[in-house]
Image (cartoon, rainbow, N blue to C red):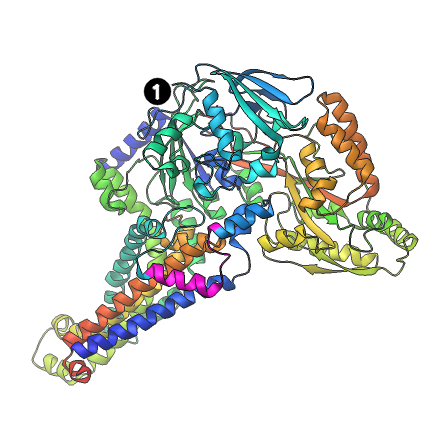
Amino acid sequence: MATSCLLLGQELWAAKTKTLIYCSEGSPSNFNPQLATDGTSFTANARVLHSHLIDVVLGETTLVPGLVESWEISKDGLVYTFKLRQGVRFHTTKYFRPTREFNADDVLFTFNRQRLKEHPYHKVGGGVYNYFESMSMGKLIKDIVKVDDHTIKFILTRREAPFLANLTMDFAGILSAEYGAALLKAKTPEKMDMFPIGTGPFRFKRYEKDSLIRYEAHPDYFRGKTPIDNLVFIITPDASVRTQKLKTGECHIIGEPAATDLQMFKRDPKLRVLQRTGLNTAYLALNVEKPPFHKVKVRRAVNHALNRKAYLDAVYLGNATQAKSALPPTIWGYHEALQEYEYNPQRARELLAEAGHADGFTTDLWALPVSRPYIPNGKKLAEMMQADLAKVGIKAKIVSYDWPTYLAKSKLGEHSMLQLGWTSDNGDPDNFLGTLLSCAAVMGGVNRARWCYKPFDDLIQLGKITAERNERIKYYRRAQEIFKSEAPWVAIAHSTIFRATSKEVVDFKINPFGPDLFYGVGLQ
Amino acid sequence: MFAYTLRRLTILLITFIGVTIVAFSLIRLVPGDPVLLLLGERGASPEAYAAMRANLGLDRPLLLQYLQFLWNVFHGDLGISIVSKRPVIEEFLSRYPATLELGFTALLLATCIGIPLGIVAAVKRNTIFDYSFMGVSLVGYSMPIFWWGLILILLFSVTLGWTPVSGRISALYDIEAVTGFMLIDTWLSGEGRAAFFNAFRHLILPAIALGTIPLAVIARMTRSSMLEVLGEDYIRTAKAKGLSNLAVIIIHALRNALIPVVTVIGLMVGTIITGAILTETIFAWPGIGRWIVHSVTSLDYPVIQGGVVLIATVMITVNLLVDVAYMVSNPRLRSQGR
């Protein structure tokens, strides 16, 4: 009886203090989004703790001011001047008490740590700023100049229309320069990445290794305090255990639910299922440097040979839409009128005959070795593709490696056909068309089709340096037409992201970029 | 006695070096490159890749890497985790209490239930109880832990709602780690009995899942050992003297029957550590088992090497202590040792 009363007391306390419990699929590698490379870490360390100069409207790709009040772009497109928001407070915690508000020094600290090798924090945490580098920010930013405490200028080496979108990415979350200085003085700079201080909606309280992460609402958050008081991450690596914890009410929201549990969640009256098309594309890259894929007719034949509708049911369990472009339909610039390659084995055989391969040919098909949001089961997909290709005379041998080797070897272009995918970093079309299909990306190895086609590349470069969005849309639409005609990929699918939550949870929305967001989420 | 201990220590040192070689080389046989894994799907420039390899010391010849590792181990330095950038020993010590708490509870459960069950099965030999016990214990011994763990969750947590699904304590209790043992920390925290009982309820299912195999082994060993002892002449004599059945079993039979059982309980420490790897993953228990699994998937070489060396050190030390204790307690071994 006494125990029951005490337990009831705890529940009443929980109800009074509003604690949201999120069961995450893994432990974060650190609490600094500049150093993270995986979605699990970004959920725990990025927008929950840090704010950005520019934000994206949740669920859209529209840019809005974050820690800036306004911005101006010079006529030559090389200088971006930001007026910083005033009155923004950093977190006050047991381990750090800020004496000043956010200002230009924090912006300098955040970006200079990543771009300047001589910066005292550059080497802390390993010195590899994966996302900053992958967006070429180091080469793009020529200088950052503090005009006054509330004005800062970014000077670029070239015009780059997606620059503002890049500033919305997780690596651009603003850190505290004052905290950095205090830790340097105490000779413990490494603490910055494990005991974070930011201006985000939650402040860090404690991390119990592989068990729990505790956050408290930041009472002075510049957009207003979030409705809940505490946020707790329970680290639960096993998907089936996460499911059971949600059913028993031990979690309010679970990360990465198993697709096979979706129907069960929908049937449960205590649970709610949210879903939306992800900003991702799964594709089969056809290596144009490996014969016979240098022939466009062979590439078109493969596009006609694959029955992608069948893959949606068997591999994605219906949780995906068929792709016809490299861009997902939720990204601006998407070409709705683009005609997709219909499944037509007869047409595929004709095209192969026209290309001089009436008897087919032998090739290799690299199967994705891990489950990714864009391809949940690469092996099954490869087997289905192999069967489809055999029907038109193409004998494909399925090849697979461990994940890092798969990525490294395919970067060198050792494959003929390769399954892969991409999730948008910043909602800009260039992040797909430029990053994955430009001539520069062939050299970097990210263009797995190794397709460098000047008419396409010219349009992509124009899109990248043009500030006017409508103009950019025109370039990207033409580029998608060329993409379709030249067929360097078989665009397979855009997978659906879904989340299951308890019905007590209100205003939780799926972030199409991946990491879950908790600002504004409440409990009934 | 001294010569025996010295010989054991020499064997221990050779075993320890063997463990370092196995720990070092096995993980390097696993396909994949930890640097590529660390850099993630988006990769990094060749310069950044090379810099990171050099930074982690992975660009040097394997033999040099091993010798450096061995040198560091003998100086008490197990390296820095590639993923968390924290010293391996610190990471180990922060998780070890969780595993110890779970392992001790599982072993306690296995012993407290296994021995009485074994005794009853031996006393009631060839009855329906004995046959049922033999069958059930065989099933318990053969069950995969991950499957058994999920069945327990489905039955006791989801269907009956008696126990929590996973974790060490409800997220609503904010307990700061002082000793690392949750049952103790809940008392120290001042949260009172409710927190303690909450932590205890969280311990029940993982302890059952982890303790099932040792329970079956201990019970079967107790049964067979008891059967052997119950057939001895001195038991017959004790019965002839008119002692009650209970007194014969507890005072005369059990004492002697327990000698091999205690040895088996010592050997079960290894089973518990192996089982903890699966149990901790299923029940989201933040111990060393889960830590090692996570390190294998992320190819965190220093953690795997250091973790295996530390676990092996614990096992070797336990074995040494058992051997020395035997030596002290058994005159026949003492004379052989001399």
The residue lying toward the viewer, choosing from A328 and B228, is A328
In the figure, is residue A88 to the left or right of A115? left
Q: Please state the horizontal and vertical placement of residue A146, each as a whole percent of the image.
A: 51, 20
Residue sitting farthest toward the left: B241
Q: Please state the horizontal and vertical placement of residue B299, each as a whole percent of the image.
A: 48, 55
Main SS of the magenta segment?
helix
In the figure, is residue B47 to the left or right of B20? right
Near mark 1 (Cα within 10 A), the count class, few <14, some 14-19 or many ≥20, is few
Q: Quadrant of the N terminus of chain A?
A: top left
Q: Which residue is mark 1?
A: A99
The residue lying toward the viewer, choosing from B134 and B20, is B20
Secondary-structure class at tag 1:
loop
Question: Is residue B71 in the magenta section?
Answer: yes
The residue lying toward the viewer, choosing from A520 and B76, is B76
Q: Is residue A60 visible?
A: no
Q: Please state the horizontal and vertical placement of residue A474, each as a whole percent of the image.
A: 79, 26
Residue at 60% across / 39% down in the picture?
A: A134
Residue at 82% across / 36% down in the picture?
A: A455
Magenta segment boundaries in residue numbering: B55-73
Q: Quadrant of the C terminus of chain A?
A: top left
Vertical arrangement, residue B84 with respect to residue A511, above or below: below
Indicate the chain on which mark 1 is placed: A
